[in-house]
Amino acid sequence: MRLVYLGPPGTFTEVAAGRAPGTAGAERVPVASVDAALNAVREGEADFAVVPIENSVEGGVTSTLDALGAGRPLSIRAEVLVPVTFVLAARPGTALADVRRVGSHPHALAQCRGWVAEHLPAALAVPALSTAAAAQVLGGAAGEAPYDAALCAEPAALAAGLEVLARDVADNAGAVTRFVVVGRPAAPPPPTGSDKTTVVASLAEDRSGALLELLEQFATRGINLTRIESRPQGTELGRYTFSIDCEGHVADPRVSEALMGLHRVCPRVRYLGSYPRADGLAPVPPPGTADADFTAARAWLADLLSGRPAT
Ligand SMILES: O=C(O)C(=O)C[C@]1(C(=O)O)C=C[C@@H](O)C=C1
């Protein structure tokens, strides 16, 4: 089994890859970008990819959302949550006052924006493909580098031969990044009672109530959404797709009905997978929306259609 992850070694994604359920003993290979990781799975060069999908402070990772929402379909098999803390690191001998440019993944730059503004008000933020990539570029390249300091995990800084100038530089304590384990399309694992389902759906047309019609497919069946994000379709200004996580498993009757409803009212629906929740929570469906309620309703309808007295 071969698993690729957003590298290089030292990223938070590497930590998530090490905890990916069902991948014990897999070869773990770092790649430079989210697209490279997902395309390696699409091309059959890897069995799974581990990529970041959202952060508790900065929200969705757009490179992941866009890559999963388009191109050859993939399947989310699991999710992993990793607490993230950052250090500011630089080449040995660099003083904090010398730092004019700070490099890291855009989500890391965003999570440390306040600290950098307070301590390095004149510093420019320079995006990198990942936190550890920023540390590696700064530590590896002799001479001129695109930034004077990097925001990364402390192990990545030390591995790159950098010195830590400051620790715990994130603005929000307790920040968490969610990662997904992605494979080629496959039947979902059986329901566990504590599952999540991810879909991407586009609206029929840009008219009032179109989004409400999409959301109603979940609300009328008592399904809670745990994430919804709009992403431009890229075809014209104002055209969006919606990346959605909802509670439940596609095999749960209420989720099955909701997805079939999406299929009826949305021109395009991409089912990305049903998988166990990392938090293990098992929400109680509202009255009338539990599996037993759907089963009883189907039995009642069968009686009614067969002429048996349906009380
Ligand atoms: O895994 C890494 O280190 C990354 O650079 C990616 C990423 C992300 O995309 O959110 C992961 C965790 C942090 O939130 C910052 C960046």
Image: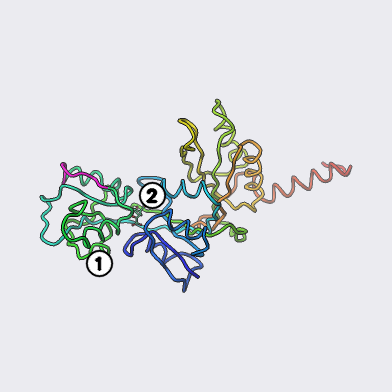
Quarter that holds the C terminus: top right
The amino acid at mark 2 is Asn
Give the x, y percent position of residue 45.
49, 64
Instruction: Indicate which disc residue 86 carries.
Output: none
Q: Picture quarter containing residue 168?
A: bottom left
Give the x, y percent position of residue 61.
40, 48
Q: Which residue is the site of mark 2?
A: 55
Q: Secondary structure at mark 2?
A: strand
**Does label 2 point to a residue whose CB lies under 8 Å from ligand 1?**
yes
Q: Picture quarter containing residue 92?
A: bottom left
- Work out whether 119 lies above or below 191: above
- Taking the image as shown, residue 286 lies to the left or right of residue 11, namely right
Q: Which residue is the site of mark 1?
A: 159
Q: Secondary structure at mark 1?
A: helix
Q: Dots 1 and 2: beta carbons under 8 Å?
A: no
Give the x, y percent position of residue 7.
36, 61
Q: Which residues are magenta?
A: 120-126
